[in-house]
Image (cartoon, grey):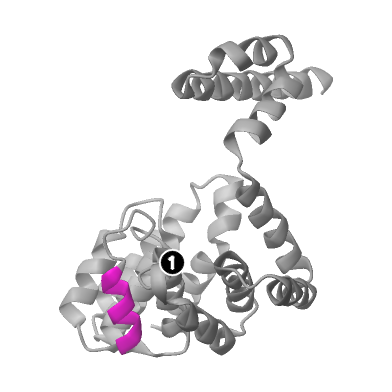
Amino acid sequence: MLNSEYSIFYIITIALQVVCAIHCVKKGTQQKWIWLIVFLPVAGSLVYLFSEVFTRRDLQHVQLGVGAVLNPSGTIKKLEERLAFADTFQNRMLLADAELAAGHTKKAIARYESSLAGNFSENEHVLLQLCLAYSATEQWEKAVHVGRKVYKTPQFLRSKVHIAFAQALAQYGQLDEAEVEFRKMGGRYANFEARYQYGIFLAQQNRLAEAKQLWQQLTEEDKHLSGTQKRENRAWTQMAKTALQKI
């Protein structure tokens, strides 16, 4: 048992060293960091990650994300106080994102919309979040409108926003375009949420045989996933099984 645990720790340590070494070489900072990474594998790599890879904003988002899950009301209150102290675009976004995650969708929409001004009138983050929020509140036309604005951004492809955009297109009556978008998010052993929702789309068009085949694929693929992948996709495979029982 100890040998097994030691082997896993050794593999992780080596992988961490390799990742950090490659990153610092690409960044051109190897003279400053490489010896620390080599001779102090764990400590040196962690120091490098937090000094050169993770920005202050990254760490802030991680901290807020954990807080939002454990105590959403407390997180929102703290962010409201922060915004009252300093009304900056970043603080408005942190609060709006927390509100959206906590289900306070109308408040989040109002905050996002009021932030689309001046230099931020076409801000990608705001538009991406608005696409999600509009879809959640069944404002389909608005979701389609903002979705088209961010369609070509790197963050859009195969994201939850892409799914929301495809659903909005379907509900807005753009059925052919909606199907094109759902098909773009296909692929075996991946994108379970998008493929489950594509099944819903097919069923709504009375294409039950196609929907059934798609949901069966999801349940079959689930048997071959790793433990982590199973947990990540459990909700969608369970809903696929339920949907199959209703057909």
Q: Find out whether residue 145 is within the magenta segment.
A: yes
Horizontal side, residue 61 vs residue 195: left or right = right
Q: Is residue 244 visible?
A: no
Between 110 and 116, which is closer to the camera in this rendering?
A: 116
| Residue marked by disc 1 | 160
Answer with left or right where residue 177 lies relative to residue 144.
Answer: left
> Badge 1: how crowded within 10 Å, few (<14), some, or many (20+)?
some
Q: Quadrant of residue 103?
A: bottom right
Q: Is residue 189 above or below residue 156?
A: above
62 vs 228, nearest the viewer:
62
**Left or right: 33 in relation to 111:** right
Question: Mark 1: which secondary structure?
Answer: helix
Tell me if residue 125 is in the magenta stretch: no
How far across and how far down the image is residue 234, in percent?
56, 62
* Segment colored magenta: 141-149
Count of numbered circles in the view: 1
Give the residue at x 58% y 71%: 97
Q: Out of 178 and 6, give the one closest to the viewer.
A: 178
- Quarter holding the C terminus is bottom left
